[in-house]
Amino acid sequence: MENESLLHQKLSLFGVNPKKEERHNDNKTTSSAVTIRGVLTSLKENLNEKDKRPVIHLGHGDPSAFPCFRTSTVAEDAVVDALRTAHYNCYSPTFGVPSARRGIADYLNRDLPYKLSPEDVYLTLGCSQAIEISLSVLARPGANILIPRPGYPLYEIHAAGSNNNLEARHYDLLPGKCWEVDLDGVEALADENTVAIVIINPGNPCGNVFSYQHLQKIARTARNLGIIVIADEVYNHLAFGSTPYVPMGVFGSIVPVISLGSISKRWIVPGWRLGWLVTSDPNGILQNSGFVDSIKGCLNAASHPVTFIQVCESTIN
């Protein structure tokens, strides 16, 4: 109860704040000004146009660029049919088309010990926007967030953004232990201003898959520290090897979990830009603290995913 009270106290600081104030944090990480896409753009601009050899991109994973990778024709037909009705050329509801929210909740519920409701699901413009919303809600002067090293640089970019007061602190993944989280290092990094830990499972870039037991330890560590878990699961079910994929939301009764995902990777359609942010929190801590209201406030001012893609979600899943 003491740890739950600490978490509630921290989250209560993240009330809805519609005003974009200019704030300053001397501890913010700024090293992520260099991105993979930026490097690729620079390389492309400096290529010798007279050299006709093909260029192979190794820095941006988009399987749809190759003819051997293609999504299901069932999904393609669903999109075509939705377009031809002319019913879905309109703006989307702020939090997503209700049938799509319900479909994603049903899809995720297959692997959970409790049931998500459609109201736990918020549709976003790809998983990238889900990351941005999550960190925007957590941002406040002096706050810090724990992110994996190696990891996905977009978290550091948003933490260091001009509108986000978040210091990015890096914890290590242990190569000698199948890239497990260094939990001792996490406990050493965290302090009273730590608000969340990010995990990426299956891992990017390492491709590791955390075991049930390790995820449970992560949940208990986060609970003891009074922080939430942001679980980037965009590669869910793309797990290779003997360790089965387990969603972090399984442990939502131990610690509140923000689960992030999209249709981009598993269904080979990154250009369709449909992602989600899901609150896995059967104890209602995120709701009672005002955290969910802050998510809604951010989405009220955000761009929304394409409507006709949303209405096809149940067919795609």
Image (cartoon, rainbow, N blue to C red):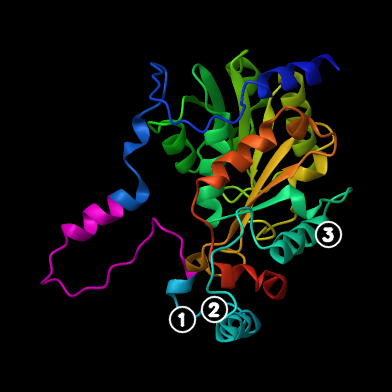
Query: Which residue, given by chain and number where applicable, does mark 2 sit on?
Result: 70
The Cα–Cα distance between marks 3 and 1, rounded to whole angstroms, is 31 Å
SS class, disc 3: loop
Image point (74%, 33%), residue name: 286
**Residue at x 79% of width, y 17% of height:** 5
SS under mark 2: loop
Dominant secondary-structure state across the stretch colored magenta: loop
Query: Quick check: 217 above or below 6?
Result: below
Query: Which residues, given as a range, are shown in magenta?
Result: 39-63
Q: Is residue 152 magenta?
A: no
Q: Which mark is residue 101?
A: none
x then y, percent, for residue 207: 59, 51
Q: Helix or strand or loop: what does disc 1 sit on?
A: loop
Q: Residue at image x 14%, y 71%?
A: 51
Q: Is residue 57 magenta?
A: yes
Residue 33, quarter of picture: top left
Q: Earlier in the sequence, mark 3 or mark 1?
A: 1
Q: Is 304 situated above or below 173? A: below
The answer for how far apart the CA atoms under marks 1 and 2 are is 7 Å
Where is residue 143 drawn, in percent x and y? 54, 20
**Three-letter amino acid code at the position of disc 2:** Arg
- Residue type indicated by callout 3: Arg
Q: Are marks 2 and 3 in contact (CB under 8 Å)?
A: no
How packed mark 1 is, by other alpha carbons closer than 10 Å (few <14, some 14-19, many 20 or more), is: few
Residue in view at x 49 percent, y 18 percent: 141
Q: Which residue is mark 3?
A: 110
Q: In which quadrant is the N terminus drawn?
A: top right
Q: Nearer the viewer, mark 2 or mark 3?
A: 3
User: Mark 1: which amino acid?
Assistant: Pro
Q: Is residue 198 visible?
A: yes
Q: Which residue is mark 1?
A: 67
> Mark 3–mark 1 contact, CB under 8 Å?
no
